Amino acid sequence: MPELVDWTDRRGFDSYRASQLAGWFYNRPLTAVDDMHNLPLDLRQALAEDFDVTLPERADCRESSDGTRKLLVGLSDGARVESVLIPRGERLTLCLSTQVGCGMGCTFCATARMGLMRNLEPDEIIGQVLLAREVAGPQPVTNYVFMGMGEPLANYERLVAAIGLMTARWGLGVSPRRITVSTVGLVPALKRLVTDTNVNVAVSLNATRDELRDDIMPVNRRYPIAELLEACRQLDLPRRKRVTFEYVMLAGVNDSDEDADRLVSLFASMAVKLNLIPFNPFEGSLFEAPAPERVDAFQRRMLDRGLHTTVRVSRGRDIAAACGQLAAAGS
Ligand code: SF4
């Protein structure tokens, strides 16, 4: 809200108007400044000159047979990103994008093929939230994950600004405990994130050897596995909060018993949660999904050795909305 207070001061309006504006911006769907009927005309005119209050365009919305909805979000310059609403029981999780495309080049990810086109601005990230809330209707969004298009920490300042708007009481009022940022492991920004916000952290690991991780995640050449894990070990997390590690299972590539054993060794001195994600194929993808029995055996091997391991059930595969499948293909 400080920016809104600055704006009202600059434009010669009473500063109490800032909280009225925040209420309109963050809590009600707006299509035009004239919707703000409790504001005087001169204030609405000033707003119309300085702000675009409309939501991003809902360019497309597809619903999967499992209830997952993929939104294609049209931005003011014509760029498009995807957001995904994933229902599970009482929970409704919103997966958000932070960049148009992505420059990280992970070889198992459809978004990587777009390359990095640009970073999203904080208002474009918030616009996804407001649009998704409108699509969700009466069911409240309960959880927010930054796992959509783009590497969130490669757009650090704007990400943190958006999280600030999401968590502010005068903003969207979301508890940081309900927000998770997933990263490939940009070590310096990862450390800052924990200091600057109180959100949950997920690290996408996907290999147990540098040789393989260099191949499938080029970021590993900058921050190899040992350096990444040491940084995670040093994170100043509140007691009982753990880093989640994600592990996309690629058939015949990283899903052997030896990989499972190496994961157990890598995490021997850390309290972590490991989330296995069987690969979701996309058109032209280089990898295949492991058989369900392989996933079970891999998980069991780690559970037997005391590593807290879950398997993420794929949602929205039939509409290319599952992990690694987002590519803003459009309608
Ligand atoms: S997995 Fe994430 S970081 Fe890697 S290319 Fe895809 S969107 Fe980017």
Image: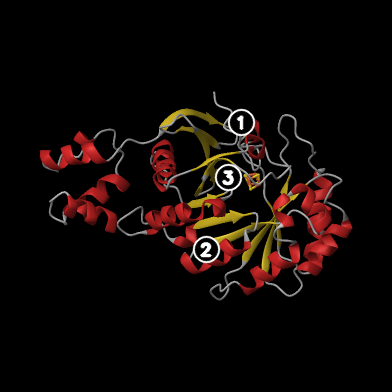
- Which quadrant of the figure has residue 160? bottom left
- Which residue carries the number 1 mark? 319
Q: How many marks do you count on the picture?
A: 3
Image quadrant occupied by the N terminus: bottom left
Give the mark nearer the N terminus: 3 vs 2: 3
Give the mark nearer the N terminus: 1 vs 2: 2
- Which residue carries the number 3 mark? 150
Q: Position of residue 172 (x, y in %)?
A: 36, 52
Mark 1 sits near ligand 1, with its Cβ under 8 Å away: no
Q: CA distance from mark 3 to mark 2?
A: 16 Å
Residue type at tag 2? Leu
Mark 3 sits near ligand 1, with its Cβ under 8 Å away: yes
Asked whether residue 143 appears in the rendered view, the answer is: yes
- Which quadrant of the figure has residue 305? bottom right
Labels 1, 2: front one = 2
Give the mark nearer the N terminus: 1 vs 3: 3
The reply to whether discs 1 and 3 touch (Cβ–Cβ < 8 Å) is no
Residue type at tag 3? Gly
The residue carrying pointer 2 sits among few (fewer than 14), some (14 to 19) or many (20 or more) residues within 10 Å by Cα, namely many
Mark identifier at residue 156: none
- Which residue carries the number 2 mark? 193
Q: Nearer the viewer, residue 91 or 200?
A: 200
**Disc 1 secondary structure class:** helix
Labels 1, 3: front one = 3
**Disc 3 secondary structure class:** loop
